Structures are given as C-alpha cells and as structure tokens.
C-alpha cells in the first residue's frame, strides 16, 4: 500500500524538499488508514468530536438559520409540506429539500416523546451535522481516485478540521448537505475522467445522479452549476464530450426528473408560478445583479476569506497551488482545477458574497493539497512558506485574544473556561509550525488537525456558552416562559430577529413602534410586550393615555450581532 510521503510525481517532477518519513505522525497516518473501514471510522469519530461541541448550546444564529428552522416548524404546525413560509410571508428562495429533512428529524423526535422538540434548534441542525459528517467521509472516497489511502485520510481530516465546515455543521441551513452532494458528484466525475480505461461501477453512476437530484432539491442550480462547469472544462481539455456518456445521462436525467419534478410541479400549482418568480426572478438575479441583503463584497473576497475559513489546511493549500500551473498537463490537476476554478471565478464575480458559497469547492482543494504533499512539493523549501505557515498558530492565538476581549466588553468578564483550551490549541499550532520549519509536513498536518480539535472544544463547547450578551433571543424567550401565562400573546418592538419568532412562537407580533405595541397590550388576556429601550418612552406614554400600567417583569440587556449594537429590552405584561 502506498503511504503518504512516497513520491508519485509526474514525469519530470523533481522530488525537492520531500516529506520526511518514518516519524510518529507518518506511522500514525499509515496505521489509521490500513483499511478503508478503519479510516472511515476514524474520520467519523473525528468529525463528531469537532462538530459536537456547542451543537446544542449555540443559540439560533440570525438571520438565515432561524428562517429555515421556522419554515420547517410551520410545515409541522400546518401540515403543508409543499409551500414554504415564515410566519405569513412566503419564503420562496430555496427548494424544499432542507425543510423536509429538518421536519422529518423534528417529527421523529416528537414521535420518540422529546419535549418541546419544535422549539429546540438542535433538532433542526441534525441534517447539517449529518451533511458535514458525510462531506468528510465522501471526501475520503473521492480522494482515493487521486491519492493513497493515507492521503485520502488526511484530505477528509482537513475538511473535518476546517473552520467553515465546522460552522455549517452547527447551523440549520443548506450548505453542509449541499457540499456532501457535490463531493459525491466530484468523486464520480473524477473517476469517470481519470479512469477512462476502466468500467465505472453502476453504483457510482447512480450515486452521482442521486446526489445531483438532491442538490437541486436542497439549493436549486448551485450543484448542477458546479458539476456542469467542471464537465465543460474537462471536455474542452479533452476536445471531446464522449467520455461523459459513461454517466449515462439519459437514464440519469430521467432519475433526476422523477426525484425533483413532483415537488416543483406541486409548488407551481400551489403558488401559480410565484415560487419561480421569487426564487429566480428576485432572489437569484438580485444576487447576480447587486449586493443582496447588505452582503456585497469586491472580487477577491473569497480568496482572502479562504485563509480563515479553510484553516488549518489553507496555508498548505496556498503553498501547493502555484504548482497547478506547472503541472497543468496532468489529468489529476485538470480535474481539480476544473472543479474549482470556473465556479470560483463566478462566485467572485457575483456582487453578493457570503463565505459559505464556495464551501462545495473546498474538498477538491483539500485533495489537491494532499496530492502535492505526497509528491514532496509542500515544505519549507517553497518560496515564503515558513513565514506563511505562521498562519497556523495565528488563528487560535487571534481567537484567544479576540474572544477574551469580546467577553470582557460584552459581559464584563472574559470567558475563562475556554481560554486554557485556546492556549493549548495555540501551543499545538506553534508545534505544527516548528515541524513545518523542519520539513516534517505530515507531522505539521496532524498537529494542525489536533489544534483544530482542541480549538473547537474550547471555542464552541466552553467559550460560546459564556457569551450571554449574544444570546438575547433565548433569554427573552426564557423571560416570556417564566411569566407563567398558559397561552400568552406576545409582541416585540425594536428587536425583531427571526430567532425570536422561532423561540417565542409563530404568532409573535411585530410592532412598528411603541404606540402599536401599547395598542397590542390593550387587548384581552395575558399579553406580553418586549420593548427595546429606544421605543420604551413612546410605549409607556401611550399606555398611560389608555390608563393601563403594565408590570415590568425584567430587563434583558444584550448585543445584537446583526445590528452590531447593544440593546436593552424591557419585558412587560398585562392581564396575568
């Protein structure tokens, strides 16, 4: 069995600065990848260890996550699994796939007797968690078309350790599941292109088309765009399209239609075509034409963000990438570039930019990086590699300092529980840098992954729960529950994030000003008003004119991440 570090360099490639072999890290990688089953178990356990901390304690993260979760929640409340709505507003932006997955998990939890499952964000995150784990495991499978089992293990581990996939694993959104489907397509397409002298198993082709169809149900055209651009680029390189017949496109497109058409037909009939007008005519074209929802960024944003979002492997990728041009004639290089480059250019060109848009491209970069490591071309001999590798300890050190300051400023006390772990992660990362300086690149990779594991536990598991100022919606929901009214009517003014709707209830009223909130409180029954300080004077004055004096239950100060400002919300009740 080929071990990572053995040269499989293309003809004419000189093994300069080869990876040092024989150390404990190399032996560890070899032992853990001695069989596919063992490697998959290791990657599964690593993924769970990295993604689990903070999974349940992290508050619903405004704004996209609670919008997805609330729409799934309303499907369960109404029994309508075709239309997608947030309160009374149609949410015709993404297809139904993720909502069905979330609803199925929550319905299963309720069937098992879980209390209050519909208002517990962790259950809505389970599809994302499983999607992230699947991404890691399928990256291993995809990488086997390029590298040794040891290299495939490292490629999967790089994905598990990456900051961006760790974030998406904890958010009830589409991107982790989408990435899993795209890696399946990448691995299938790579085998078809690189192994043209072999018969591709029918199961691989079926997996490609099943992933293709699921990607459409989860996020519309993104998955087909990425794989379509890659197939087109490879066809141009090959000056032929015949190799794509191996995908059995006639059979595959029929399977895709059978999977996706029923819901698209149903939503078209239900909305009279409004879904397509909104999702394509407004949502997608708005992102292409202008920076939607204040998410504009200039070209180059993803390139800069990559060094943080793909930490700790990003700097190794940056060292490896210049060789892509030198080795551009190699088929394996062509496959990786075809997957990454066309889609990356499009994402950079579109004005609306969010870090997770390029996540489906990261597995190909992880595989490319490990392949170049196997060829002995990632090491301190590369230009500026040693100072660049300081990024490995820089990220945990930056989080240690930044989160310490943030905790002190927002809550008056640093998050002491997580700081020792962040310090340990920094020290392990420094060890990784020292190993890189000596040319022990496999040891660098293993130590960097270990640093990510420690950092995940420290940041998500120990630090994040202590940042109470950021948990404004959960604390307001707790205040509402503590009042003890069996069926309260609740209004909010001055703070109207989707997370509050998800936690308090679908019927949460949104007042435009203090006077409207006062009028709401003048109604019958137990009524609760959540009034931000800026609207409080008008609210109390309006109630005074009505001759009503509500009881101030508590005040909930906090920090709204989206607004970027401190808030102070009073909780008032009448008719207890």
Image: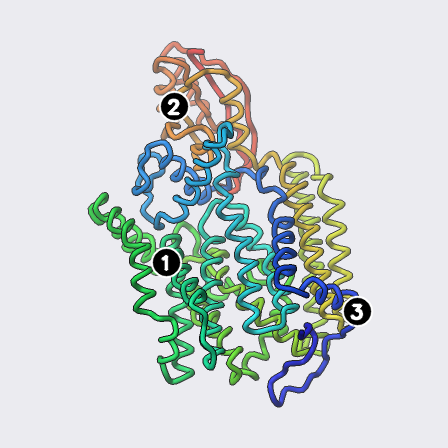
Dot 1 crowding, Cα within 10 Å, few <14, some 14–19, many 20+: many
| Residue at point 48%, 44% (across, down) | 172
Which residue corresponds to mark 1?
213
- For marks 1 and 2, give the one nearer the viewer: 1
Instruction: Name the residue at the top extreme.
Output: 547
In the displayed structure, would residue 156 be above or below residue 78? below
Residue 166 spot, x, y in % from top left: 58, 52
Residue 366 spot, x, y in % from top left: 58, 66
* Residue 23 disc label: 3
| Residue at point 56%, 74% (across, down) | 146
Separation (CA) of disc 1 from disc 3: 45 Å
In the displayed structure, would residue 295 be above or below residue 337? above
In the picture, which quadrant includes the N terminus?
bottom right
Which residue corresponds to mark 2?
517
Nearer the observer, 234 or 508: 234
Separation (CA) of disc 2 from disc 3: 68 Å
- For marks 2 and 3, give the one nearer the viewer: 3
Residue 277 located left or right of residue 107: left
Q: Quadrant of residue 315?
A: bottom right
For label 1, the SS is helix
| Residue at point 40%, 36% (across, down) | 73
Residue 277 spot, x, y in % from top left: 25, 52
In the displayed structure, would residue 111 be above or below residue 570? below
Residue 222 spot, x, y in % from top left: 39, 60
């Amino acid at each position: 069995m080929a071990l990572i570090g053995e040269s499989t360099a293309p003809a004419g490639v000189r093994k300069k600065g080869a990876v040092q072999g024989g150390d404990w890290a190399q032996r560890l990688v070899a032992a853990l990848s001695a069989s596919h089953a063992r490697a998959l178990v290791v990657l599964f356990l690593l993924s769970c260890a990295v993604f689990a901390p903070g999974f349940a304690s992290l508050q619903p993260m405004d704004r996209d996550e609670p919008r997805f979760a609330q729409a799934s929640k309303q499907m369960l409340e109404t029994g309508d699994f075709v239309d997608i709505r947030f309160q009374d507003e149609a949410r015709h932006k993404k297809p139904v796939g993720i909502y069905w997955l979330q609803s199925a998990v929550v319905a299963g939890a309720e069937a098992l007797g879980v209390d209050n499952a519909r208002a517990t964000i962790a259950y809505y995150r389970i599809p994302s968690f499983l999607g992230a784990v699947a991404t890691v495991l399928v990256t291993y499978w995809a990488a086997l078309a390029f590298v040794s089992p040891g290299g495939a293990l490292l490629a999967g581990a790089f994905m598990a350790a990456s900051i961006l996939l760790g974030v998406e694993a904890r958010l009830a959104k589409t991107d982790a599941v989408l990435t899993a489907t795209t890696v399946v397509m990448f691995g299938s397409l790579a085998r078809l292109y690189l192994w043209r002298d072999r018969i591709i198993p029918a199961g691989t082709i079926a997996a490609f088309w099943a992933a293709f169809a699921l990607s459409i149900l989860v996020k519309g055209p993104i998955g087909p765009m990425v794989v379509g651009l890659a197939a087109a680029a490879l066809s141009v390189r090959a000056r032929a399209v015949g190799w794509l017949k191996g995908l059995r496109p006639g059979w595959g497109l029929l399977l895709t239609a059978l999977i996706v058409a029923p819901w698209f037909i149903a939503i078209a009939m239900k909305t009279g075509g409004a879904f397509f007008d909104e999702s394509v005519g407004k949502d997608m074209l708005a992102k292409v034409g202008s920076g939607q929802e204040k998410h504009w960024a200039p070209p180059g944003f993803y390139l800069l963000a990559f060094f943080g979002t793909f930490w700790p492997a990003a700097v190794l990728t940056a060292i490896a990438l210049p060789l892509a041009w030198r080795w551009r004639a190699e088929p394996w290089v062509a496959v990786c570039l075809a997957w990454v480059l066309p889609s990356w250019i499009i994402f950079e060109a579109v004005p609306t930019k969010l870090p997770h848009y390029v996540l489906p491209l990261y597995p190909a970069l992880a595989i490319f990086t490990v392949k170049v490591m196997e060829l002995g071309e990632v090491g301190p001999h590369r230009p500026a590699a040693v100072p660049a590798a300081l990024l490995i300890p820089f990220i945990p050190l930056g989080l240690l300092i930044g989160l310490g300051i943030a905790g002190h400023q927002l809550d008056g006390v640093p998050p002491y529980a997580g700081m020792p772990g962040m310090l340990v992660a920094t020290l392990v990362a420094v060890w990784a840098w020292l190993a890189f300086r000596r040319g022990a690149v496999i040891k660098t990779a293993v130590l960097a992954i270990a640093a990510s594991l420690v950092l995940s536990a420290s940041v998500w598991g120990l630090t994040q729960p202590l940042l109470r100022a950021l948990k404004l919606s959960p604390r307001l929901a707790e205040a509402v529950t503590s009042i003890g009214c069996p069926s309260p009517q609740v209004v909010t003014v001055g703070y109207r994030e989707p997370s509050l709707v998800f936690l308090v209830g679908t019927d949460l009223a949104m007042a435009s000003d203090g006077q409207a909130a006062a009028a709401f409180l003048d109604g019958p029954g137990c009524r609760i008003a959540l009034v931000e300080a800026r609207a409080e004077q008008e609210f109390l004055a309006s109630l005074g004119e009505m001759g009503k004096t509500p009881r101030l239950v508590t005040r909930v100060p906090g920090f709204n991440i989206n607004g970027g400002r401190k808030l102070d919300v009073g909780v008032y009740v009448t008719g207890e």
